[in-house]
Image (cartoon, rainbow, N blue to C red):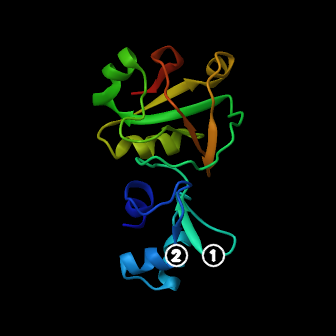
Amino acid sequence: MVAYLLRHSQLPDHHGWVEVERLISELYLTLEELVQVIANDTKGRFELSEDNFSVRALYGHSIEVDLELEPSTPPTTLYHGTATKSLASIMREGIRPRSRRFVHLSESIEGALEVGSRHGQPIVLKIATPAMLTHGHKFYHAQQGIWLTDSIASEYVSIISP
């Protein structure tokens, strides 16, 4: 529920922040419980402000927010996890963010497999990041092995696992 409110509701401000007091009142949590949720999130989705006054999600938004991410140079290889049922569409049209703001990419095959398995029979796609950079595409480092980009044309996608 924390992820939903921080990424998809009307609570976040323009930069994605929600006051901690407001969030805990919406969720009927204590401050300690919210801090535990954030600390125990293995995906590293959340960030507390330096003064502990506000919290935000670092990626996965469907709402318009400016996280003030700066373009970064990604690793030579990034991976995208999806379901096999989406493969034909991806190879025809590329990877689009759909209801999200960005396409999410993983630094590891394991991370991509985990994401793909949430949507059905998983498949891992390798992304040609050097070629995308050469053609002017931007990448943003979100958190813990997660990278974001606007979209990926099918020419930059290859299948590495069935």
Q: Secondary structure at mark 2?
A: helix
Residue 52: quarter of image: bottom right
Residue at 60% over, 75% down: 53
Q: Is residue 4 above or below residue 150?
A: below
Count of numbered circles in the view: 2
**Three-letter amino acid code at disc 2?**
Val
Whole-percent x, y for residue 106 in the image:
55, 40
Residue 39: quarter of image: bottom right
Q: Which residue is mark 1?
A: 52
Instruction: Tell me if label 1 and label 2 are in contact, CB under 8 Å.
Output: yes
Whole-percent x, y for residue 33 in the image:
48, 82
Residue at 32% over, 21% down: 89
Residue at 50% over, 13% down: 155
Whole-percent x, y for residue 4 in the image:
38, 60
Whole-percent x, y for residue 32 in the image:
52, 84
Q: Residues within 10 Å of mark 2 (few under 14, many from 20)?
A: many
In the picture, the quarter occupied by the C terminus is top left
**Three-letter amino acid code at disc 1?**
Asn
Q: Nearer the viewer, residue 125 or 2?
A: 2
> In the displayed image of the protein, which residue is found farthest to the front?
14
Residue at 38% over, 55% down: 8
Q: Residues within 10 Å of mark 1 (few under 14, many from 20)?
A: few
Find the distance from the CA under tag 1 to the CA under tag 2. Answer: 8 Å
Q: Secondary structure at mark 1?
A: loop
Q: Which residue is mark 2?
A: 20
For marks 1 and 2 on the same chain, the one whose residue lies earlier in the sequence: 2
Q: Nearer the viewer, residue 47 or 74?
A: 47
Residue 92: quarter of image: top left
Q: Is residue 142 above or below residue 159?
A: below
